[in-house]
Structures are given as structure tokens and as C-alpha cells.
Image (cartoon, rainbow, N blue to C red):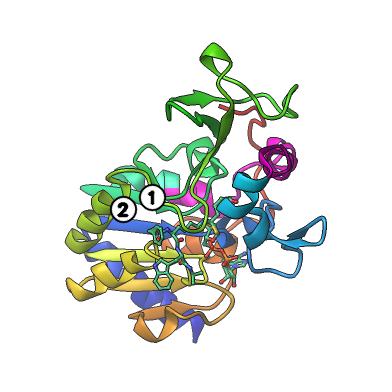
Amino acid sequence: MIDDQLQQARQYLAAARRVVVFTGAGISAESGVPTFRGKDATWKGMPAAVASSIGLLEQDLTTAWEWFDYRRTLLKTVVPNAAHLAVAQAETRFEDFLVVTQNVDGLHQKAGSQRIIELHGNIWRGRGLRTGKRYPLPETPLPTLPPRGDQDEPLRPDVVLFGEMLPAGAFEEAEIAASRCDVCLVIGTSGVVYPAALIPFAARDAGAAVIEVNPESTDLTPHMTLSLRGLAGDIVPRLFGQASTSPGLPFTMHTGQG
Ligand code: BJW
């Protein structure tokens, strides 16, 4: 069954000129990054959705930074897995190819993807609370919390928390690309967070084939052209016609940030 669907999905890709790859936390799961709605998604007894809320940040910036610096420390040793690498390797095979990610972990960049829209920001940057100026923050653990920018300005993590707007233009650019693509791959997302979850709908409504890769059924599943049940690290390399070596095992890559 999965082989038939894979075959069909590969046929869609073979005929495609423009591809959008829409990713969520599940694509990084086999690299060892916890997902948001998985069983391990708590920190100090708090659900990840609470720790990643504007409420916590406004109430206690230092505690919010402790949560993000804890995750930055976990991420420092994490490497892209076979799915990130397969996506990066596929980029030059299509006339137009764009990764639209909800992830803040920077693993698509580490894998070598060039064209990426980060809808929810990046955990390796800080942003000035007063000026909005962005600063790369590769060091972890950070020596002082909160980190500070020019003129001693306190920084916040440059990520999008619930109730916050997405970075200017990011969603719009992603939505335009989705509405022009031939195939939209939807990899490792529960599809419950908006407006990001509208991206597959923009593709579908414009007539694209929308193909989900996820071990579980999601809110998006009923709207998909095809749903491939399985782990991204196994399915994605096979989708792009690349050999699947040791499904689920991360490849050995450089581990430095940036
Ligand atoms: C595998 C796998 C393997 C596992 N292989 N797969 C419309 C309706 C209702 C509500 C709203 C709406 N529009 C807006 C809202 C409000 C809100 C929202 O969506 N709420 C819903 C939850 C109800 N949205 C917002 O607030 C957004 N802002 C906004 O709308 O601004 C306008 C506005 C402003 C002011 C007032 C009102 C509106 C902002 C959303 C920001 C989300 N931020 C986070 C945190 C980022 C920082 C951080 O990293 O901490 O982004 S929340 C979290 O969820 C994170 C993720 O990017 C995002 C999506 O999660 P994702 O990636 O789907 O992960 P999971 O864990 O949910 O799923 C993982 C999946 O992988 C599962 O399906 C697994 O099965 C699968 N999987 N292993 C393949 N090996």
C-alpha cells in the first residue's frame, strides 16, 4: 500500500516544475528534537505551548530565556537527518523549490537548503525588545540571561510565540509560492497552528498535489491528495528517489552552529 502511494507521489514529483516543502517539528524528530505536541513536550512541568507563549515572556523574560537556552543547548549537538538532507539535495532538481518551515531549529540550513522561509523565526537569533534589531546568538549556554544588544538593550528570542504576528511578509511570500506550486509536500506537522497551516490549503486550492508525510493522521489528512504514513527519515529520501540508508538514523554531519 505505502509502496503504491510512494510510486504515485514520485510520479507527481517527476512531472512537477515548482515544489513547496512545508515542514514542522516531525521532520526534526529523528534528529532527536522533541515535537511540540508529543509526550515529552513539557519543561519544568509546563506544556511547551505555555513555555513558548507571549504570556511567559512578558511576565518573566529570564525564565522564557531559560526555556529557549535549554532547547538551544539540546540543539547544539543535533544534526540534520536523512529527511533534511534529501530535501536539500532535491532543491536543484526543480525549476522552483522552496522550503517553508515552522521550525526554529536551523536544521534545514545545516542540511544545505538554500531557499527557506522561516515562518516562526529562528532560535539562534535574538531581537531587541525596544528596537526590534536582530542579532545572531550562536553561543550556548548564553553567558547572561537575558542577552543584551547595542546600548545594553535586552533581547528576546527571535521566534514567533502564540498571539504574535509572523515576520513581515513571510507568510504572504510562502502563500504565493504555495498557490503557484505543482506539488506541496507537507512533512511532520500536526497542522493545528495558524496561519501556517493555511499553506497546504493555498496549494490545494490552486490545484497542486498535496502530499503528507507523517506517521500519524492529522487535521490536514482529509484535505491531502496523498498521505504517506511513515517516518520522514525513511519516506522523504525514497520520495525523491534517493536511497534510504538506515531509516530513522541521523547522518553524521558537522555539529557547529551557524
Ligand atoms: C513526524 C515524525 C517523524 C512525529 N516523521 N512526522 C485560526 C484558528 C484558531 C486559532 C488561530 C487561528 N489563527 C491564529 C490563531 C491563534 C494561534 C493558533 O494557531 N492557535 C491554535 C493552536 C489554536 N496562532 C498564533 O497565535 C499565530 N499568530 C497569529 O495568528 O498572529 C495573528 C494574531 C495576532 C494577535 C492575536 C491574534 C492573532 C502564531 C503562532 C506561533 C506558533 N509558535 C510556535 C512556537 C515557536 C517558538 C518555539 O519554538 O518555542 O511554533 S508553537 C509550535 O507549534 C511551534 C511550531 O512551529 C508550531 C507547529 O507545530 P508542529 O510543527 O506542527 O509540531 P507538532 O508537535 O504539533 O506536530 C509534530 C508532527 O510531527 C505530528 O503530527 C507527528 O505525528 C509528526 N511526527 N515524528 C514525520 N519522524
Q: Amino acid at mark 2?
A: Phe
> Which SS type dominates the magenta stretch?
helix
Q: Quadrant of residue 178?
A: bottom left
**Is 144 positioned to the left or the right of 206 in the image?**
right
**Is 182 positioned to the left or the right of 116 in the image?**
left
**Mark toward the viewer: 1 or 2:** 1
Q: Amino acid at mark 1?
A: Leu
Residue 180 location (% of width, % of height): 17, 60
Is 226 situated above or below 171?
below
Q: Quadrant of residue 77?
A: top right
The mark found on residue 166 in the picture is: 1
In the image, the residue with mark 1 has its CB under 8 Å from the nearest atom of ligand 1: yes
Is 54 situated above or below 121?
below
- Crowd class of label 2 (few under 14; some 14 to 19; many from 20; radius 10 Å): many
Q: Which residue is mark 2?
A: 171
Circles 1 and 2 in contact, beta carbons < 8 Å: yes
Question: Residue visible at 28% across and 65% down?
Answer: 183
Residue 66 is one of the magenta-drawn residues:
yes
Question: Residue visible at 65% across and 51% down?
Answer: 56
Is 241 situated above or below 76?
below
